[in-house]
Image: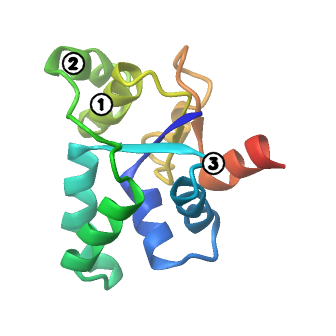
């Protein structure tokens, strides 16, 4: 199962291994989930790591160890443009575009305001919170 991680989930999982986000990162490291992030998401994680009191250098190292070969290139502009019409914040269109271009099976996010509200509204895109994903796929 190919799962796209939004930056919010990776940051939450790095901050606390006890929650659903941390568990999902653990499942990626033991190859139970084929987790991936885009270069844009990678950069956003590093850029926002200080907000959670995390050191950006150690965050880079952790991300690279978790998503070893699964940091994919940024999506094509034409795909981003298609999804910019489907999201309330065009800045999130790259997430959906990456999902489509990488043929993902699921997107996990903590973004309630812009992405989780799209659950069931965009054909072919399966959006979950980390907890919902764990319950639906691993229990």
Quote the CA–CA distance across marks 2 and 1: 7 Å
Q: Quadrant of residue 59?
A: bottom left
In depth, the one of 117 and 7 nearer the eye is: 7
Residue indicated by mark 2: 81
Q: Earlier in the sequence, mark 1 or mark 3?
A: 3
Instruction: Give the residue at mark 3.
Output: 32
Tell me the element at label 2.
helix
At x 28% / y 49%, what residue is drawn? 41
Sequence order check: which comes first, mark 2 or mark 1? 2
Q: Say few, some or many: other residues with alpha carbon within 10 Å of mark 2 (under 14 / 14 to 19 / 20 or more).
A: some
Of helix, strand and loop, which one carries label 3?
Answer: loop
Specify the quadrant that holds the N terminus.
top right
Q: Using residue 124 as the reference point, say whether residue 78 is left or right of it.
A: left
Residue 125 appears left or right of 97: right
Marks 1,3: beta carbons within 8 A = no
Say the numbered circle drawn on residue 93: 1
| Residue 96 position in % (x across, y down) | 38, 29
Q: Residue extending furthest left?
A: 77
Disc 1 from disc 3: Cα separation? 27 Å
Confirm or deny contact between disc 2 and disc 1 (CB under 8 A). yes
- Sequence-first disc among 2 and 3: 3
Across and down, in percent, residue 17 comes to 57, 76
**Badge 3: few (under 14), some or many (20 or more) residues near its Cα, within 10 Å?**
few
Q: Is residue 75 left or right of residue 62?
A: left
| Alpha carbons under labels 2 and 3: distance apart | 33 Å
Quarter of the rendering containing residue 19: bottom right
Residue at figure coordinates x 19%, y 77% from the top left: 57
Q: Tell me: 4 left or right of 89.
A: right
Residue at the location (50% across, 68% down)? 13
Q: Position of residue 89 (x, y in %)?
A: 30, 37
**Front position among marks 1 and 3:** 3
Circle 2 or circle 3, nearest the eye? 3
């Amino acid at each position: 199962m190919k799962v796209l991680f939004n930056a919010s989930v990776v940051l939450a999982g790095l901050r606390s291994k006890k929650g659903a986000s941390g568990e999902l990162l653990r499942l990626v490291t033991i190859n139970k989930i084929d987790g991936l992030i885009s270069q844009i998401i990678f950069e956003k994680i590093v850029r926002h790591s200080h907000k959670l009191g995390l050191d950006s250098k150690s965050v880079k190292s952790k991300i690279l160890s978790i998503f070893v070969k699964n940091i994919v290139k940024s999506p094509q502009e034409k795909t981003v443009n298609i999804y910019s019409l489907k999201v309330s914040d065009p800045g999130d269109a790259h997430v959906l575009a990456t999902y489509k271009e990488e043929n993902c099976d699921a997107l996990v996010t903590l973004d309630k305001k812009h992405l989780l509200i799209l659950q069931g509204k965009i054909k072919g895109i399966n959006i979950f919170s980390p907890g919902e994903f764990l319950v639906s796929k691993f229990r």
